[in-house]
Structures are given as C-alpha cells and as structure tokens.
Image: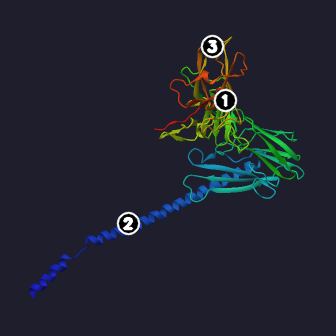
Amino acid sequence: MSALLARLRSIRTSESGVSLIEVIVAMMIFAIISVGVAYSLLSAFTITGDSRSRAVASNLAAQEIDLDRSSGDLFSLNSTDTDKQVRVPAGTGLVYSIKRIASWVYASGADVNCNASAASSMLYKRIRVEVSWPNMIGQPVTSDTVIAPSTKVSIDTLGTILVSTRSAAGTPVAGVGVAVSPNPGSVPTATDSMGCSYVLKVPTGTYTVTASLPGYVDPLQNPTPSSTTVKVEAGKSTSASFTYDKAGTMKWSWPTGGVIVPSTASVSFLGTYGVWSTAASSPTTATLFPSTEYDVVAGTYVPYTDSTNSGCRSPNPGDWPQYTSAGKTYAAPAPPSGTVAPGATATPLDIGKLPMGTITVTNPSNQTGKLTIRAVSTAPFVSGDPGCTAKPQAIDFSTQLGASANSKMTIALPYGAWTLKYGTSTNPTTVAPSSWLSVPTGATGVTIGSGGAFTLDPRVVQP
C-alpha cells in the first residue's frame, strides 16, 4: 500500500505546472486578438483618411464646375484628354486627378454624337467632373451640371451639320479645317479636341463638306476628302464623318542589273479600303494612309467588279491561280507588303524591289533612227492569266532601242500579256513581231506567242 501511494505522488508531481501545448494555444489566441485589434485600427485610419480625401475631392469638383460655368465659349469646353493634376495641400499632399466629360445634348435629351445624324437640334451642354486620388476606396467623386448657351445654337427652321474626324485607330483628330459649299451662312471652325466641328443655323439643302489638314490623308489617299451627300433638314442635325490620319511613307526600288524599267508605269496598293494607284511616273515612294497592310504591285491594278468589268488583274501575282504540270506545282509568290506608321515620313518603310517580268527585244535591221518602245496590254493566251483587257495599260520607256541592226535591250514590265509597239516618233504604232522577242537569260515565266504577243507569268516551281 505504501508503494502504491508513493507511485501516485510521483505521477502527480510530474504533471504539475503549464504544458507546452497550453503555452502555444495561449500565444495563438493572443496573436489573433492582436491582429484583430491592429486591423480595426488600420481600417479606422484608412476610412478616416479616405473620408478626408473624399471631402477634398468634392471641393475640387465643385470648383471645377464653377470654372466650367464661367467659361465664355461652350464650344471650347470639351472633354479633357489628360486629367488635370492638383496637389492638396500644395507641395506635400495627395495628388488629385480631375477629369471633365462634356457633351452637347439634343432636345430629345440624348447626348450629341457628331459621328451620327439625329432628328433633333442641340440645346445645351452636359458637364460631368470626376475626381480621383491614389488608393481611394470606392468610386471617384463626381459632380454634374448642365450649361445653356447665352443664345440659341439651333433654330427650328434651320439645320445643323456635325463634322466628325477620326484617326485610323478611331481616336478624335483635332485641328482639321472644315469647309462647306455652297456657303452655309456661318463660318465652320476647325475640329475640336473631340474631333468635332459644328456648322450652325444652316439653311435646308444639299452641301459638300471638305476636310483638310497638311500631312493627313483618308483611306483612299485623298489629302482633302469630301462628303457630297450631306442633306440638311429643318430642326435636324446631319453628320459628315471622315476617317483621317497622318500619312506615312513607303518606298521601293525597281529591277536592276541591266534591265530597262518603264518611265510611265504606275504602282498599285491593295489594302483594306480598296485599291489606289500612283500617277504613271514610275515613282519610288508614296505617302499612304496608316494602319492597314498594303500589297504592292507594279502597274495599274483594277479589281474585278462584275461581268461587265473584269478589270486589270494581271499585275497582281495573288490573282494568278496555281497549277500542276508534269508533276510539278507552279504558284506565284506573294507580292511585297507592309504597313506604314502614322506620320512616318522621315524614315519611310522600305519594302524592297518590285517583282516584275522581263523580255528582250532585238532590232534585226538598220533603222533611220532610234526606236521608241511602248508596251500595250493584249488579250491573255496563257491559262490562268486573270487578264487586263477591260482596263488595258500602255507603258512607255525613256530609253530607246538602238537604230543599228541587232541592237537589243531587256525591259521590265508588270505581269500579264503584252505586245510591243515601236517607231521613231514618240507615238509608236507598229507592233514588233514575235521574231524580235526572246527570253532573257535566267528569266522564268516568259511565253512568246504569235503576232508579237508575249506573257510574263509570276508563277514559279514550288519546292
């Protein structure tokens, strides 16, 4: 019995005091409570600071509204492109960003979109001011108002022309000059920061609106694009919209290596908005509308429209279908292409050498003088040639063929079917026979037919 009691006393003694587990649990509880208290304090400080910042922002918004109301010209009161920065207190405080959103409002209550017509007239301007700051909680502080012009900008018996200018990226283009013909009775102003110009109190009728800004072009490469179908109606707003952007420059080179290049060839650009061709002067550069990729081909390319106009499609290698002969596949390489950047005129985009076909012409006998050579489109006779009969081309060369027998020269031409005319005058009329023609060394895709016709085919054997 004494031994048992001694054993129990020993066990009770070893379990006296606080265990390690109890210490850990107590520390965790204390940590949780401490974090909760710290979070509560931090939240209180944050909310207090945000409330203080929100009060400052409200004052700034009210001040901005007052400034807008004191503006003497509502047409110059536009949405801001860049937020105004104000530090409160000055020097050491938070930086507040102030943004203005402005819009004319129709009599119907809808905001005016100068890019769209509306069966209503402009009445007043709606202004919203937004103020934000770093690490704010929730939405920016906003303040709204409407401002009426000192005199009516619209009359029920007259109409309004809304002019809109947008870049290739869809952003407003400011500073574009606007002209309206015939005289609308009011002087149009250049487009504002929203890309809008308002021609007010215009008599009913049809008007031509023209936009102009040096260095800018529209998607059809027009420096002064016009909208000729603007019809003004009483009590309504009619829009004339332009896509207008800074032109970029593209450059290229013509074939070299002893090849005579044309002096009156055009260069065609096939893009998203259609086809545009340069003047027939064999240029080496062109200024183009940006942000669309162009395929570039030598010659005047005219697309197919319908059965009555098959165009002139031979110059574009992409219009020649691939074919198989003797187990080999023939296809045309893609023409050079590129996209110019807005305003990139100092450093033009170089697309390299224009792909063209070549033919050698030889004068077999002595002539009274040097021969002027002119290439003229003819009917296609090679399978797959898309043709150029609907819009035939005539291309001249400033270099003449020698008058002595066996004089020869190799000329470069756009792809397609051709005949050559020769003569001692500047307007040659005699067709050079097929016997005058030969395939240049190393050339491919040249087929010499009868009657002086020949085809320059862009298709080559595929590996």
Q: Earlier in the sequence, mark 3 or mark 2?
A: 2
Q: Is residue 419 left or right of residue 105?
A: left
Query: Cα distance, mark 3 to mark 2?
Result: 110 Å
Look at 63% across and 32% down and name the residue there: 417
Nearer-the-camera pick, 185 or 306: 306
Q: Earlier in the sequence, mark 3 or mark 1?
A: 1
Is residue 257 visible to the viewer in this orientation of the structure? yes
Residue of label 3: 365
Look at 71% across and 56% down and name the residue there: 144
Which label sits on residue 31? 2
Q: Is residue 273 above or below residue 4?
A: above
Disc number lying in front (3 or 1)? 3
Query: Cα distance, mark 2 to mark 1?
Result: 82 Å
The reply to whether dot 3 and dot 1 touch (C-beta < 8 Å) is no
In the rendered structure, which amino acid carries the disc numbered 1?
Answer: Ser
Q: What secondary structure is found at the residue carrying circle 1?
A: loop
Q: Is residue 381 above or below residue 408?
A: below
Q: What secondary structure is found at the residue carrying circle 3?
A: loop
Look at 75% across and 48% down and name the residue there: 114
